[in-house]
Amino acid sequence: MSSERPRRPATISDVAALAGVSIATASKALNGRDQVRQETRNRVLQAAKDLSFQPNALAKGLLSGQTRTVGLLTSDSVGRFGIPVLLGAEDAFGAGEMAVLLCDARGDAIREQHHLRTLLSRRVDGLIVVGQSTDPRPSISRDLPIPVVYAYAPSEDPQDVSFVPDDVEGARTAVQHLITLGRRRVAHITGPADYQAARDRAAGVRSALEEAGLGLSGEVLYGSWSQRWGRQATDIVLRTDPEVDAVVCGSDQIAAGFVEAARERGRRVPDDLAVVGYDNWEVLSAESRPPLTTIDMNLEVLGRTAAQHLFAAIDGRATPGVHRMPCRLVIRESTLPS
């Protein structure tokens, strides 16, 4: 058995000694400070590389004025929309070697203020605020000394940085898919009219139909985000237009309810009726009979992008405005036979 002792990790003193500079100069060079000549910086960086030097995160933070810590403040940590956004953001923060502090306000303004005070006391470098719907929310940025990025629910202030799914274009994509399949009589069943997502998706459906020279079959049917509403709306759709050959639903829950009720009324999906859902909630979309063609909002990508833009904002390169992120069509058997 070898008697050699494990080699200790290199310190900044070792780097300074090998580069022939003071510890202070080595620190400045490693942290990108301007007061160091390029030749000296190169010598220090080479010494650090030769010694496999890993800078201490706390010391690095003290020199840069940053803690390498960010806050994630959510109102939807148990929801199927908030979780993918949080996972995507955490992926980006992990890649950037940032520690993450997660707080759940549960939709309560007082609880949110408490969490904000806690995060500020921890000296976080920035904050991502994740909403529970795409409805605009009050801005908190003006009262905070750190950059804030809003994800899923945009800020009401257009000067803030917000990332939301492009629901208008997502619904347009659903209709365009149906039109390419030869469907011409398209109905639309969606959630409550006071939800921004429902209004945006309805606007996208109408826009794509108008672009193709087609009209909507009946009126937009607003209701709840539920299978029960999907079942109830089936009779309205079939009574309004017995020749209807396609339905775009504002959620996978609505679509699953519609497919179930249509089958009970002798309508075959997709032969008689092609059906598109929304959200790609795979518990429903992949397990429905038949599996649902649906729109995926790419929420993990949205969360990851929001985190990357928070990095930029921390560096003083904020990108104000509402950024609409593309959705994607997931094709399954409810529009195309297997």
Image (cartoon, rainbow, N blue to C red):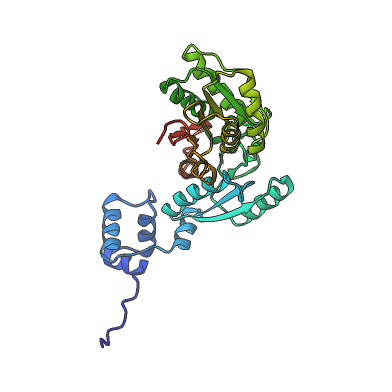
**Residue 35 visible to the viewer:** yes
- The residue positioned 66% from the left and 52% from the top of the image is 115
Q: Is residue 291 left or right of residue 72?
A: left
User: Residue 70 placed where, x, y %?
Assistant: 54, 52
User: Residue 223 placed where, x, y %?
Assistant: 68, 30
The answer to whether residue 226 is above or below residue 6 is above
- The residue positioned 36% from the left and 69% from the top of the image is 11
Give the quarter of the figure containing the C terminus.
Answer: top left
Q: Is residue 181 left or right of residue 199?
A: left
- 272 vs 10, nearest the viewer: 272
The answer to whether residue 327 is above or below residue 101 is above
- The residue positioned 33% from the left and 65% from the top of the image is 53
- 293 vs 55, nearest the viewer: 293
Q: Image quarter for residue 17?
A: bottom left
Question: How many marks can you see?
Answer: 0
**Residue 226 visible to the viewer:** no
Q: Image quarter for residue 46?
A: bottom left
User: Residue 153 placed where, x, y %?
Assistant: 60, 37
User: Residue 294 placed where, x, y %?
Assistant: 49, 35
The furthest residue to the right: 110
Give the quarter of the figure containing the N terminus.
Answer: bottom left
- The residue positioned 43% from the left and 20% from the top of the image is 182
